[in-house]
Structures are given as structure tokens and as C-alpha cells.
Image: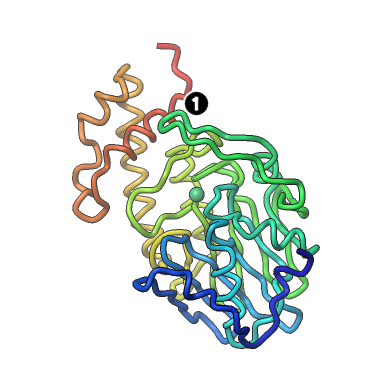
């Protein structure tokens, strides 16, 4: 088991790809000589930096794809063993490599709240889905509260607005001008508002605002879902979620129910671009209860 994440440069003869459906295709987007976005079928985005010491990963994909992900990482130019893994938040789409990396004795960096969620079972009331706690070895072993920095100059920080969960972090690669934002920003459709672990629509707005000073016009912004974004995209999203936050808050203050909020179609004008908004509106409206707790 030890060293499972320590895949060396070069290819092995193990026929891992044979286990994948014939239609699946990995994509590798090169952002810099040492920085890549990996997209595996059905997986959320993984960012890999190759360094002399080994590979730094931002998120790891889900556990079912762990072997395929490690193989894709090992195939990158200049790849070595995974030495550091960031969890941008606790969701299983981000933390599926934790066990391998933890067993190899490497760093798993996360906000302390993310670690805490991974030490407990979580159930989503809206669909009954339960997430089992991770074994100790797979839990983040290097947590922080506000900001941190790797020796290489890579910076990371807490997005305290609770855009997606209450443990969101960003990872900033200043040399490459790349900002990895995890679930704080969605590049593809409406995001999941996970209010059980702290996410809310006010946090979406706050998180988008908080990230903007870290970026300039040339910054490549990498979300968990969807294509690489720009600062202009963040500004567009800030306006959209800001407008929705206002509309939903007004409905809440008028004592409307979640059903009434959905029926009012407050996000109608954005649906051509973003898709059907019903679930997003319902979850966002419910998320306001947790934060604004009206007495009505
Ligand atoms: Zn997520």
C-alpha cells in the first residue's frame, strides 16, 4: 500500500486503460510548462503542477477514478510522485485520492473545516445522499485557517464567504498567473448550493468578489466544473448571482415558500445560458434560511 501515489516517470505495462469505456477520453490542457488541467470522464477538474520534487495536485477526482487519475498524472511531462494534494473542499469529487496520498505519507492540505467534514458522515436532506467519513489516513494532515504558502511560492487561502461549502480554498500560482478556485466558481451550469455544510447564495456573491483582487485580465481561473475562466467571467457571474441574491432575499422577506420562489422563475433570463434553474433556486432559497433565519 505504501507508495501507492509514488508513481515514477515513464509508463508501466499495467493495462489500466482497458478498464475504461471505449468512448472515454482524458483531456490535458497545458497552462504553462509545469502546470496542467486534467479532465477525466465524469470527473471534476484536477490541476497538476510538476516540480523537481514531485507533483502538486489541486483536487484529486473521485475515489472510483483514483487509479486512472494517478496514471494520467504520471503521464505528464516531468511528472514524479504526488508530494502535495490540496482539497479545495470536502466533496467526494475532490477527495478521492486522499487515501493513496495519505498512505504514501504525503501532504494533504485543506481548510480546517474541510478536515472536520471529512471526519463525520454527512447527509444531504434534499436527496438523502449520505457521504461516509474518510479513514484517518485519508483526512487532510495539514490544515490552515486563513492563508498559506508552499516553498515554491504557490499561495493558498480560505474563501470564508461559504460560496460552495464552509471550507472552500483557492490555490494561486502567481508565476503562471493561474488561480484555481474549486467549487467557489462554477464554469458550467448552476452550482450545487450545499447549505448543509455551509454553502449559500450570499457566499457565491461574496466568494466571487473576494477572488477578483487576486486576478488580472490575463489570469486563467480554473473551476471544478467547466472550462477555464477569466476575470471578465467572474464579473459577469458576480452581477448575475448578485441580482438573484437580491430577488430571493426579497421573496424571503415577503414570506414566500421555496415552491413559490421556484414558481416565480427569478432566474428565467439566465436559463438560456445556464440551463433550468429550478433546483438551484430552491436550494439557494433554502440556504437563505440558514443565514438570515427569519422569524416568520
Ligand atoms: Zn463540490
Q: Position of residue 239 (x, y in %)?
A: 34, 50
Pick the front one: 278 or 99: 99
Pick the front one: 96 or 250: 96
Left or right placement of residue 283 versus residue 269 in this view: right
- Residue at image position (32%, 27%) is 250
- Residue at image position (45%, 45%) is 204
Q: Position of residue 140 (x, y in %)?
A: 72, 52
Q: Position of residue 289 (x, y in %)?
A: 45, 24
Q: Quadrant of the N terminus?
A: bottom right
Q: Based on the displayed image, in which of its 4 quarters is residue 149 positioned?
A: bottom right
Q: Quadrant of the C terminus?
A: top left
Local secondary structure at mark 1: helix
Q: Position of residue 75 (x, y in %)?
A: 57, 82
Q: Based on the displayed image, in which of its 4 quarters is residue 118 positioned?
A: top right
**Does 281 appear above or below 138?**
above
Left or right placement of residue 73 versus residue 280 in this view: right
**Does 114 appear above or below 5?**
above
Pick the front one: 75 or 273: 75
Left or right placement of residue 60 versus residue 151 in this view: left
Question: What coloring was used for the rendering?
Answer: rainbow
Q: Based on the displayed image, in which of its 4 quarters is residue 76 positioned?
A: bottom right
Quick check: is the Cβ at mark 1 less than 8 Å away from ligand 1?
Answer: no
| Residue denoted by label 1 | 290
- Residue at image position (21%, 35%) is 265
Query: For mark 1, does the 10 Å Cα neighbourhood hold few (<14), some (14 to 19), or many (20 or more) residues?
Result: some
Tally the numbered discs: 1
- Residue at image position (49%, 75%) is 17
In this view, the residue farthest toward the top is 296
Amino acid at each position: 500500500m505504501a507508495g501507492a501515489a509514488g508513481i515514477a516517470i515513464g509508463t508501466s505495462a499495467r493495462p489500466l486503460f482497458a478498464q475504461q469505456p471505449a468512448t472515454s477520453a482524458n483531456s490535458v490542457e497545458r497552462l504553462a510548462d509545469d502546470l496542467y488541467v486534467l479532465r477525466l470522464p465524469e470527473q471534476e477538474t484536477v490541476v497538476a503542477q510538476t516540480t523537481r520534487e514531485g507533483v502538486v495536485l489541486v483536487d484529486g477526482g473521485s475515489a472510483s477514478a483514483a487509479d486512472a487519475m494517478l496514471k494520467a498524472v504520471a503521464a505528464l511531462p516531468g511528472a514524479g510522485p504526488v508530494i502535495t494534494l490540496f482539497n479545495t473542499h470536502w466533496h467526494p469529487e475532490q477527495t478521492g485520492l486522499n487515501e493513496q496520498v495519505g498512505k504514501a505519507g504525503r501532504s494533504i492540505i485543506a481548510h480546517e473545516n474541510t478536515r472536520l467534514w471529512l471526519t463525520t458522515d454527512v447527509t444531504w436532506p434534499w436527496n438523502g445522499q449520505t457521504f461516509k467519513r474518510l479513514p484517518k489516513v485519508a483526512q487532510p494532515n495539514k490544515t490552515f485557517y486563513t492563508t498559506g504558502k508552499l516553498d515554491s511560492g504557490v499561495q493558498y487561502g480560505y474563501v470564508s464567504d461559504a460560496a460552495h461549502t464552509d471550507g472552500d480554498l483557492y490555490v494561486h500560482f502567481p508565476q503562471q498567473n493561474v488561480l484555481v478556485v474549486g467549487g467557489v466558481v462554477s464554469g458550467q451550469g448552476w452550482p450545487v448550493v450545499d447549505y448543509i455544510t455551509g454553502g449559500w447564495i450570499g457566499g457565491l456573491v461574496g466568494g466571487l468578489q473576494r477572488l477578483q483582487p487576486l486576478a488580472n485580465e490575463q489570469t486563467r481561473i480554473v473551476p471544478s466544473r467547466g472550462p477555464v475562466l477569466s476575470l471578465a467571467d467572474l464579473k459577469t457571474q458576480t452581477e448575475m448571482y448578485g441580482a438573484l441574491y437580491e430577488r430571493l432575499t426579497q421573496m424571503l422577506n415577503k414570506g414566500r415558500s421555496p415552491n413559490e420562489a421556484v414558481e416565480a422563475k427569478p432566474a428565467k433570463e439566465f436559463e438560456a445560458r445556464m440551463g433550468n434553474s429550478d433546483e438551484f433556486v430552491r436550494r439557494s432559497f433554502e440556504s437563505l434560511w440558514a443565514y438570515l433565519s427569519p422569524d416568520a
